[in-house]
Amino acid sequence: MSKAGIETAFTRLAGIRYPIVAAPMFLVSTPRLVAAVSEAGGLGAMPAHNFRPVESLEAALAEVCRLTSAPFAVNIIVNRANPYREEHIRACLKAGVPVLITSLGNPGSLIKDAHGSGTKVLCDVVDLSYALRVQDLGADGVVAVGAGAGGHAGLTTPQVLVPYLKERLSVPVLAAGGIATGRGLLAALSLGADAAYIGTRFIASSEAEVSDAYKQAILKSGPGDIIYTARITGTHGNFIRTPELEREGTEVSRIERFLYRNRWTKKWSRGLKLLSANKKLERSARGTGSRPWKDLWSAGQGVGLVHEIKPAADIIAEIIGEYEAARAALPPGG
């Protein structure tokens, strides 16, 4: 594996060695995983929403900083339906988090405050109109969340979304959706991406503090086992097809469809849906609660490419090794 790294506009922006971001995953990304990825040369990331109330986030940030001095990132849901938004932003900026990643809302005020503290900001996007909007607001880069990504995802394949955004934006573009190997990293960079945003592969890591059943489901599932539905959180996302998911249902109810017709009722009904879903997903990932939700798990289509649980540092090394081998194996002149 190259010790020199792979330089792109994003690695220069974030101060990292390899263009790999371990995507911030609800209940999966903990300080140990974040620090392990960052120590290995990538950018570890975790959702602020994993830590409630704010004192828990402050403790988690301190733990990451104790484990590594390398850059890392925190994801914040900026939608007003997130009751912890302002507290989480203040805690991250006070701790000097190098990179913030925003999801589901208007990031304007966060970008302004972050830049005042020297923090870089990436924004999740699924289409060009929102990407242009956050770029105009001052975002330092965008995460192109394409079809096949775990959790909340868009419908456009990364093979189209990444070059489409690259033609029209002046900030770095990160590719998300189905990337789990070095070949995927090579493909993403060849499309013009400045980094790969990899989530599902790191669920099957030693540092991911989720149930063994969840990890085994990652190893045993294929792309056809991933279901794209808005039933769980109110926003479309990808989940592993399991008996619990089948019992929960994958279609939005009539009442929800009615509420989604109005902008205001849609906003607040989705917020309440997300809060309820978070509780269910937490019981599922941990395997706890009076009624354990043992098999309600988020994952992307990259599950079919994950075959082994190993330490995060080994996953990074494997991806870079595969990348170098795949690049060397390209046809002459390729």
Image (cartoon, rainbow, N blue to C red):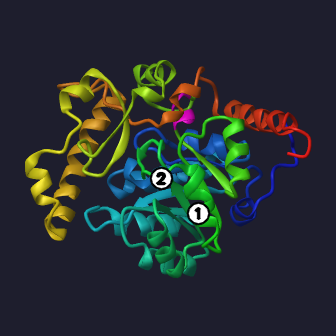
Please, what is the three-letter code of the amino acid marked with disc 2? Thr
Residue 250, image quadrant: top left
Residue at the image position 17 percent from the left and 26 percent from the top? 290
Instruction: Please tell me whether residue 72 belongs to the stretch shown in magenta.
Output: no
Which quadrant does the N terminus fall into? top right
Q: Name the disc covering residue 164, or none.
A: 1
Q: Earlier in the sequence, mark 2 or mark 1?
A: 2
Out of 282 and 70, give the one closest to the viewer. Answer: 282
Q: Is residue 198 left or right of residue 130?
A: right
| Prevalent SS, magenta region | helix
Badge 1 element: helix
Left or right: 77 in relation to 230: right
Q: Is residue 126 left or right of residue 253?
A: right
From the image, tell me which residue sits under label 2: 156
* Contact, mark 2 vs mark 1 (Cβ under 8 Å): yes
What is the span of residues highlighted in magenta in the rendered image?
200-204
